[in-house]
Amino acid sequence: CVVNPHRSVLGTGNYDVNVIMAALQSRDLAAVWWDKRRTVHSLCVSKVQGFILNVPSKVSLGIVSLPLRRRHWLAVRQVHGQYYNLDSKLKSPVCIGGEPELRSFLGEQLSQDVAEMLLVVRREVEEDGSWLNSDEARK
């Protein structure tokens, strides 16, 4: 049995964030941690390539749901003008909708206590901070 040091101890798939960062860097992208004290309306969505969320997830064995919580990564990305939830737990990608629906979805996900979000952006966007609306960046 090979131990993967980047995976959670229980092997639940909640990979270390450093794995995600390294994968993005290999594609000339960066991950920007989203401070969820900000409103999602301050996001400049057009500058973001995708969203990676780390959210609480129920644990189940078959059809039996256990009273345990673990954390789970999921991705959201725009395809042909619509945003999709690309969660691997879904049978197929789920269309979220346009930008207003995306903001609603992200706000709902981030309202959970332990939820976190990373913005996937091009390196130059990370450097110039243009992922944040200009009026919000001045604060």
Image (cartoon, grey):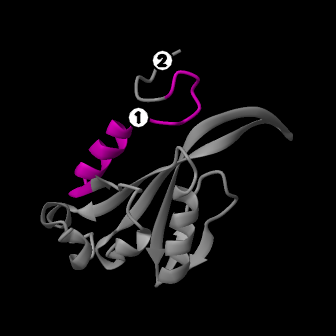
Numbered marks: total? 2
User: In this view of the protein, which residue sits in the foreground, 83 or 102?
Assistant: 102
The residue that appears at 53% across and 43% down in the rendered structure is: 114
The residue that appears at 35% across and 73% down in the rendered structure is: 42
Residue 111's image quarter?
Answer: bottom right
Label drawn at residue 29: none
Above or below residue 136? Residue 92 is above
**Kind of residue indicated by mark 1:** Asp
> Where does the magenta region start and end?
8-30
SS class, disc 2: loop
The residue that appears at 23% across and 50% down in the rendered structure is: 25
Q: CA distance from mark 2 to mark 1?
A: 17 Å
Position of the C terminus by quadrant:
bottom left
Above or below residue 31? Residue 11 is above
Percent x, y of residue 66? 79, 33
SS class, disc 1: loop
Query: Looking at the image, is mark 2 or mark 1 nearer the viewer?
Result: 1
Percent x, y of residue 102? 51, 74
Residue placed under numbered mark 2 in the picture = 2
Residue placed under numbered mark 1 in the picture = 16
Characterize the local packing of mark 1: few (<14), some (14-19) or many (20 or more) Cα atoms within 10 angstroms.
Answer: few
Above or below residue 9? Residue 24 is below
Percent x, y of residue 12? 59, 32
Is 67 a magenta residue? no
**Kind of residue indicated by mark 2:** Val
Side of 123 where 45 appears, left or right: right
